[in-house]
Amino acid sequence: MKPDANISGEWIESLIRDFIAASPYNTMQNETGEPAWDFALVGFASGADPIWQQYKEYVGPFHWTPWEVFSQHCPGKPVLAEQLTVISWVLPQREVVRQANRRARTYPSEAWARIRVYGEEFNAALRRHVVRSLKEMGHAAVAPMLVPNWTIVKSERFSYASSWSERHVAHAAGLGTFGLCDGLITAKGKAMRVGSVVARISIEPTRRPYNDHRAYCLFFANGTCGKCIDRCPVRAITEAGHDKEKCRLHLARSREHVKKTYKFEGYGCGLCQVGVPCEAGIPVKAAREALEQGKFPPPPPPLA
Ligand code: SF4
Ligand code: SF4
């Protein structure tokens, strides 16, 4: 498939960053009307990347490939996997939001809870904006998180998982690797939210600057850190990993706190995402320097 002269990686990045700069949805809905976000990292993956099949084995057969979700929701001319590009973005939490949550000990700060609700509403608006903009240029596109059959599935391995994991998509698009707490550590750290769109466009995939899906976490890189273990108020993180069920129950309890204390319907936690070495950058020096210097390791082996 020939590259579309009108659509490039730079064009998509501008589309996303311009929306962050100008959209009225980009708000924390607080008294000062502060924006929820001020920046995005953007990456691309091919619909034919073998990693999508690896996810079926690693996450579960219910995890869609880009081709599966696109074919379900963009019927029409048959499409080949290699004709699809997955656009993935990371919205790093602003310093002021991270700072507020660093002080939290049990439940999230007001700023963090606002981002969890209103920041994510913006993220959904951004997904719709990217899809609409591509369609206006004649390119079919879908935001997998917004389709009605996106679902959460019980998983033996992960307790529960979903039919489209934004974090796994961002990993595939070269944007980060997983930490002990399950969060994705990106060049702007782990305190962030992610989004994606699958489109019938051809964009050069972003090279993954890692050959290990845990390369950016100090615990896996050299056996140190483990700071996220102590940040979790309910001990949902141990050296064995992240207990999703304990985490989910704490998030559910946070609803009452948010309503009573901050006077809006919201929830959140994210205590393990701040006050830790991976909060706002890659803490593994060699990996950070390799990325800064544009050095790429050999292609990654299949996920274990
Ligand atoms: S706090 Fe440390 S152990 Fe936890 S994810 Fe970050 S780097 Fe890894
Ligand atoms: S693991 Fe869950 S409950 Fe624990 S700090 Fe992180 S988000 Fe909160």
Image (spheres, helix red, strand yellow):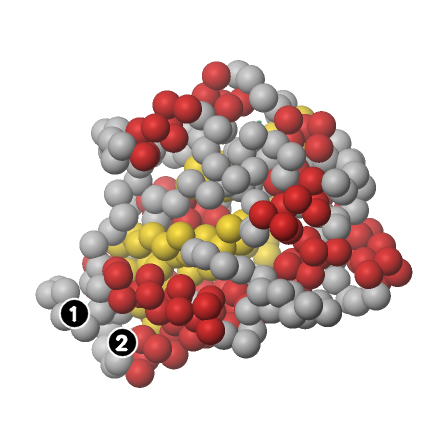
Image point (22%, 69%), residue name: 7
Horizontal and vertical percent position of residue 72: 39, 71
Residue at left offset 65%, top offset 34%: 275
**Disc 2 target residue:** 139
**Front position in the image: 57 or 22:** 22
Q: Is the C terminus in the top left, top right, bottom left or bottom right quadrant?
A: top left
Q: Is residue 214 left or right of residue 99?
A: left
Relative placement, left or right, of 223 versus 10 is right
Q: Which mark is residue 25?
A: none
User: Which residue ends up furthest to the top in the rendered image?
Assistant: 223
**Numbered-mark total:** 2
State the residue lying farthest toward the front.
32
Q: For residue 15, what is the image quadrant?
A: bottom left
Place of residue 82 in the rendered image (x, y in percent of width and height, measured from the top left): 21, 58
The answer to whether residue 211 is seen in the rendering is no
**Image quarter for residue 114?**
bottom right
**Is 129 situated above or below 204?**
below
Q: CA distance from mark 1 to mark 2?
A: 10 Å
The amino acid on which the numbered mark 2 sits, given as a three-letter code, is His
Residue of label 1: 4
Instruction: Residue at 45%, 33% (x, y): give it.
Output: 282
